[in-house]
Image (spheres, helix red, strand yellow):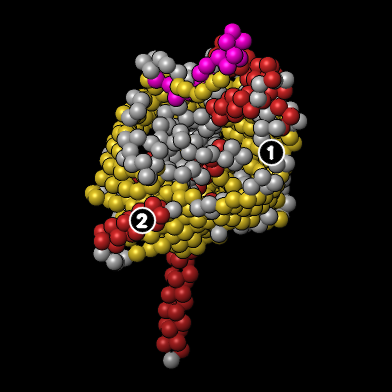
């Protein structure tokens, strides 16, 4: 928070210096969201036997004011701040924090040249469910109970400096991310991007030079008046997917091991990630989106089976400790397995589908989203209904229904489903 | 004396008869000339006249309130500010309700993007994607017909010239439009919007003609849903002014830098 405040003062000073205290306009928007979530907990899962490792709460109250402020001047400078103050309470914790998603100055140097400095939620890509070419958002906390669009909006930004040159048919961007440990986890990196539009096609190329060299491509277009298509691709050298590795055999020749987590060893391997999708809007406003994504960095069938074998064995040892060993050894191993679970990115092949029907019966908005893991046939279905009470407030009911075998990705979660009622007020 | 009075009466009678005989004949001739002029105009010229009524020029700005109705009951409205440049570029800013405040819709030629503040890059969308009620994005962002449609006269009645507008390209919002143009003044009065498979989708009525920027222009357009009877949306125009918005505003990459 102190760092955010310091940045706020620096940026404000820069802004006032640049704008020379004249010709200001102020713009704001905001919302307050109150949410009650109920979790239908499982009594026992492979990762959480008898709910002993994590005593999840069956409910959670959540309140989140979210504000955006913009101070503009007529010389083409803007100071933008977006902050959220999430507060949550359940049987396990009672917590609140201040999250600064954006706090940056955006300065027009020439009519076509822009400088952006500060904390900025920079995301790329054309996919809705997955963005293999968005390289600067990986290490941030995301609330998966929010819609795909809200997940992208409500993410803490990175400290960066960006220069953008906008021409009629193309745009060049250069972004530097300083690797300052007191500011952020990310190491120093440089992202360059070329985006262009020709005829009815949008095309973009990204190259990131940092811990791992990354290359990304985006393409989107419309066909006719109702169909949109998009494709997004990412190439990555080395993997950031964690795996369980054996540290030592606890009792010689017993096959009982202690574990640790590590990245895959093969740092030179190129990993491919691809997303292809389309959307279609019917004359009655029904909008369908279908996306398939391939994540080569995810676990292959063999890797997943190895992972499940380790989890199953440690689950069994925890419940029935062999050689009178301390069950804590096995709960620690299961804790490591929990730690590396990165839901919706664990495997290689996924299918995403979303149908939304706005203004159903006038003031209702219906949605049904489904994320299907093709590799293990587990899924999460997310139906929802939103009602516009008036011009400034909505109330919504939504669910996340998880299904799959006990050893599948979504089957490993500690609850069968999550139901939510959300009240939103917009300022 | 009698002769003098007779002379005066004769002169007055002559002058009166001249006045009353020539004026109607002149009016009739004017009407005939105008009628001939109307009949001489081809479909393209008529459509240009219609477009000039709807749009005051190539670069202008206006405000729009979009109010959907269902069975006569008013639903929540949206307020927008629309900037138009060179006829085929439009930038729509959502100003109300607060939930949508700050969103931007950009149309450049036949390409359309939406930008939601706080998110990544603008997302390419199709013209069919709906804004609110019976109004699609393209209905707001595109203010003239002649860019996207080729006109053909299909009927001339005493009151209307009926134009058939056929899509020039496949990526426009409607397959064809039947436009009812007032024969006297070229006011658009009614339009029937069809899908590419000739299914009637919507009917629009152009109403509330008021003098704006030197010409009578419709300030209200009522769009009736032909698939769901009883549902319609009213688009109210206001604050129309000639304004040249900088060209950079219509670049998709510029949207995130736009100062409100």
Label 1 packing within 10 angstroms: few (<14), some (14-19), many (20+): some
Q: Which quadrant does the C terminus of chain A fall into? A: bottom right
Q: Chain of mark 2?
A: A
| Region rendered in magenta | A238-257
Residue at image x 38%, y 28%? A203
A189, B41: nearer the viewer: A189
Q: Position of residue A178 (x, y in %)?
A: 31, 40
Q: Position of residue B78 (x, y in %)?
A: 56, 54
Q: Position of residue A22 (x, y in %)?
A: 29, 66
A28, A59: nearer the viewer: A59
A308, B107: nearer the viewer: A308
Q: Residue furthest bottom?
A: B1
Residue that numbered label 1 is attached to: A56
Secondary structure at badge 1 equals: loop
Marks 2 and 1 in Cβ contact (< 8 Å): no
Residue that numbered label 2 is attached to: A6
- Cα–Cα gap, marks 2 and 1: 37 Å
Q: Which mark is residue A266?
A: none
User: Magenta residues: mostly which secondary structure?
Assistant: strand
Secondary structure at badge 2 equals: helix
């Amino acid at each position: 928070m102190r760092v955010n405040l310091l940045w706020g003062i620096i940026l404000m000073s820069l802004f006032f210096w640049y704008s020379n205290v004249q010709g200001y306009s102020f713009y704001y928007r905001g919302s307050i969201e109150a949410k009650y979530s109920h979790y239908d907990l499982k009594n026992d899962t492979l990762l959480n036997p008898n709910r002993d490792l994590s005593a999840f709460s069956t409910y959670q109250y959540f309140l989140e004011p979210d504000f955006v402020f913009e101070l503009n001047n007529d010389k083409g400078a803007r100071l933008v701040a977006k902050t959220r103050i999430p507060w949550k309470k359940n049987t396990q914790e009672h917590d609140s924090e201040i999250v600064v998603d954006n706090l940056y100055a955006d300065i027009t140097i020439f009519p076509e040249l822009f400088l952006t400095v500060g904390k900025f939620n920079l995301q790329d890509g054309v996919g809705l469910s997955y963005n293999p070419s968005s390289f600067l958002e990986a290490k941030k906390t995301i609330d998966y109970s929010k819609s795909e669009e809200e997940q992208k909006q409500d993410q803490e930004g990175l400290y960066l400096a960006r220069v953008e040159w906008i021409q009629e048919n193309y745009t060049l961007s250069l972004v530097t991310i300083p690797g300052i440990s007191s500011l952020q986890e990310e190491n120093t990196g440089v992202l360059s991007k070329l985006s262009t539009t020709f005829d009815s096609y949008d095309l973009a190329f990204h190259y990131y030079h940092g811990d791992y060299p990354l290359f990304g491509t985006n393409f989107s277009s419309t066909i006719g008046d109702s169909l949109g298509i998009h494709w997004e691709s990412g190439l990555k050298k080395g993997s950031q997917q964690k795996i369980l590795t054996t540290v030592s055999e606890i009792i010689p020749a017993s096959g009982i091991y202690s574990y640790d987590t590590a990245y895959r060893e093969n740092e030179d391997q190129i990993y491919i990630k691809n997303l292809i999708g389309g959307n279609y809007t019917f004359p009655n406003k029904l909008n369908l989106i279908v996306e398939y994504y391939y994540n080569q960095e995810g676990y292959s069938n063999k890797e997943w089976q190895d992972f499940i074998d380790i989890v199953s064995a440690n689950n069994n040892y925890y419940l029935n400790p062999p050689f009178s060993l301390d069950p804590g050894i096995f709960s620690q191993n299961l804790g490591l397995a929990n730690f590396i679970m990165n839901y919706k990115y664990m495997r290689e092949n996924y299918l995403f589908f979303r149908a939304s029907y706005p203004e159903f019966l006038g003031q209702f908005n219906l949605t049904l989203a489904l994320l299907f893991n093709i590799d293990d046939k587990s899924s999460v279905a997310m139906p929802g209904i939103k009602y516009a009470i008036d011009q400034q407030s909505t109330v919504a009911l939504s669910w996340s229904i998880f299904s799959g075998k006990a050893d599948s990705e979504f089957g490993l979660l500690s609850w069968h489903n999550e139901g939510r009622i959300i009240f939103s007020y917009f300022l | 004396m009698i002769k003098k009075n007779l002379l005066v009466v004769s002169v007055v009678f002559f002058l009166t008869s001249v006045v009353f005989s020539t004026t109607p004949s002149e009016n009739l001739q004017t009407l005939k000339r105008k009628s001939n002029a109307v009949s001489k105009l081809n479909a393209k010229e008529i459509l240009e006249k219609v477009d000039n009524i709807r749009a005051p020029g190539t670069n202008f700005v206006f405000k729009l309130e979009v109010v959907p109705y269902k069975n006569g009951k008013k639903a929540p409205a949206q307020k927008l500010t629309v900037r138009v440049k060179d006829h085929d570029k439009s930038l729509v800013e959502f100003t109300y309700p607060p939930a949508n405040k700050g969103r931007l819709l950009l149309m450049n030629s036949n390409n359309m993007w939406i930008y939601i503040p706080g998110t990544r890059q603008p997302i390419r969308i199709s013209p069919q994607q709906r804004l609110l009620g019976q109004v699609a994005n393209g209905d707001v962002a595109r203010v003239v017909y002649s860019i996207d449609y080729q006109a053909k006269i299909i009927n001339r009645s005493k009151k209307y010239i009926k134009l058939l507008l056929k899509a020039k390209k496949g990526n426009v919002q409607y397959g064809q439009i039947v436009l009812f143009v007032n024969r006297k003044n070229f006011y658009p009065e009614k339009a029937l919007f069809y899908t590419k498979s000739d299914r009637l989708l919507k009917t629009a009525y152009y109403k509330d003609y008021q003098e704006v920027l030197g010409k009578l222009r419709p300030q209200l357009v009522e769009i009736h849903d032909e698939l769901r009877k009883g549902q319609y949306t009213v688009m109210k125009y206001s604050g129309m002014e000639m304004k040249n918005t900088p060209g950079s505003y219509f670049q998709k990459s510029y949207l995130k830098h736009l100062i409100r």
